[in-house]
Image (spheres, helix red, strand yellow):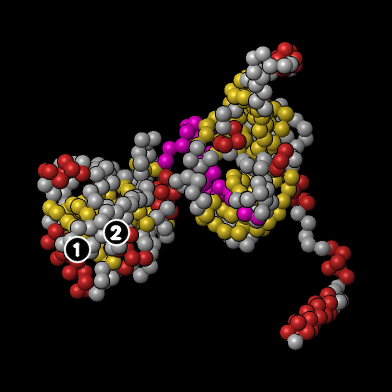
Amino acid sequence: MTRTVSAFLYRLCLGAVMAIAMVPMPAQAFQNGPASVAPLAKKLIDAVVNIATSQTVKGPSGVPLPKVPKGAPFEDFFDDFFNKRGGVPHEDRRISSLGSGFVIDGKQGLIVTNNHVIEGAEEIEVNFHDGTKLKVDKIIGRDTKADLALLKVTPKKPLADVKFGSSDKIEVGDWVMAIGNPFGLGGSVSMGIISAKSRDINSGPYDDYLQTDAAINKGNSGGPLFNMDGEVIGVNTAIISPTGGSIGIGFAVPSDTVANVIDQLEKYGEVRRGWLGVKIQSVTDDIAETLGLNESRGALIAAVTPDGPASKAGLEPGDVILKFDDKDVTTMRGLPRLVAQAPIGKGVDVELLRNGHQKTVQVTVGRLEATDNDDNDLKDSGEQDLPPGAAIMGLKLSALTGALRQKYGLDSKIKGVVVEAVDPQSPASKKGIKPGDVIVEAAQTAVSDPDDVAASVAKVRKSGRKAVLLRVEDGKGDLRFVAVPIS
């Protein structure tokens, strides 16, 4: 009976589909089809280039040579055969690779591409759509963090070029066009839409990719992603693919980021990023609850660099940055991007939450040096069986003594209560608190002995909150906030 019903339903659905398909459509719809993008592609394609690089590497020349024991039959034959074919176990080899790029200044011959396209290259040649080839005279600058590079060629006549548009204005669902050099097939055009914005694919500290389903393959790297006005709104950089080919998940560096980086590379030959002088972490749901936020948003300051811009402006650990320079900080990772793009020396308004109250302070942006480790998420883990007698949230706590400082390698400047053991089944263990950590604050109150921690926990429990916010410092001096659930 079941099989019969199923067969009937199948026939019914098929009939419905056939009936719909047979509904007459206007003849004009079949004649014209969707609007052609040929005029736009023709206008842009001359500004998109193929980039060929070559370099010399040391290593095995190919398949390992067979080893023939001394005195074996045909030993002389093998030696003679492979010597004639240059069978050297290790020799220098010339390798080449292909990528894409685009011209942003046709008179000066300035070309944008990905840094990874030219990484390690000894020679770089630019191939144009009309068959012209030019050697790259100079790498004006490169930025590994944004994976961008600016190249210089000397054109015999002005080159076709393109301009940047606003990636901020592009919306999910808008049509985009990618032009590049996939698998060495130059001048390939593909169409798609913006699938998502602000994608973090863990490729660097400033991930903020546009996601598109336009076909992007190997060789498209460094090529432009255009809006329907012919403006560059992204630089195609990465794909997710189990096969090595496009499955409709490609990523482009937004043009707002690209334009800022390229402008600095052209002016200075390097990128000069803004610096705030804080260590930050995500505002999780449980941390948001302890701070009185109605949702998890912003960036929580775990530590402030002495004499840094944030310190001079009066920012404090425990502050949650909600806005930076009038731009919302929706997630922790959003803040480093905003700070990095801010002009050095500019005074910007920072809106923050402190002790349940919002306030605004002005910070003068500093310059991020290569040695600075600014605005990083703080992570740690570890656990240990808890001996009998410990009672505070599954933690055995002790006041700091000289012997305990020596045991855990703690600096004399660290103040608080040291964790000596952790119940592996406790919420504190699951939150990454480990022996040797020092609780500096509990519920945003400084503590110096276990009784202080117990009092803060009791106060939080009485208020009806579900977790207590601890500020924890490890032996390396790294500070972080941890919201530990309490029963």
Camera-near label (1 vs 2) is 2
In the image, what residue occupies the spot 61% across and 46% down? 236
Query: In this picture, which residue range is highlighted in magenta?
Result: 248-273
Q: Position of residue 97 (x, y in %)?
A: 66, 33
- Residue neighbourhood size for the residue with mark 1, other residues' Cα within 10 Å, grouped as few (<14), some (14–19), many (≥20): some
Corner quadrant of residue 6:
bottom right
The answer to whether 429 is drawn above or below residue 71 in the figure is below
Q: Is residue 67 above or below residue 456?
A: above
For disc 2, the marked residue is: 424
Helix, strand or loop under label 2: loop
Q: Which mark sits nearer the N-terminus, 1 or 2?
A: 1
Location of the N terminus (image quadrant): bottom right
Residue sitting at x 18%, y 43%: 407
- Residue 392's label in the rendered image is 1
Amino acid type assigned to the residue bearing label 1 in the image: Ile
Q: In the depicted view, which residue is nearer to us: 418 or 79?
A: 79
> How far across and down, in percent of the image, does residue 115 sit?
56, 36
Question: Is any atom of residue 425 visible in this view?
Answer: yes
| Separation of marks 1 and 2 at Cα, in angstroms | 14 Å
Left or right of 222 on screen, residue 36: right
The residue type indicated by label 2 comes to: Pro
Residue 455 location in percent, x, y? Answer: 14, 65
Q: Report how many numbered discs are placed on residues in the image.
A: 2
Near-viewer residue (71 or 440): 71
Q: Is residue 178 above or below residue 319?
A: above
Q: Is residue 383 magenta?
A: no
Circle 2 packing at 10 Å, graded few (<14), some (14-19), many (20+), is some
Image position of 264 (left or right of 465): right
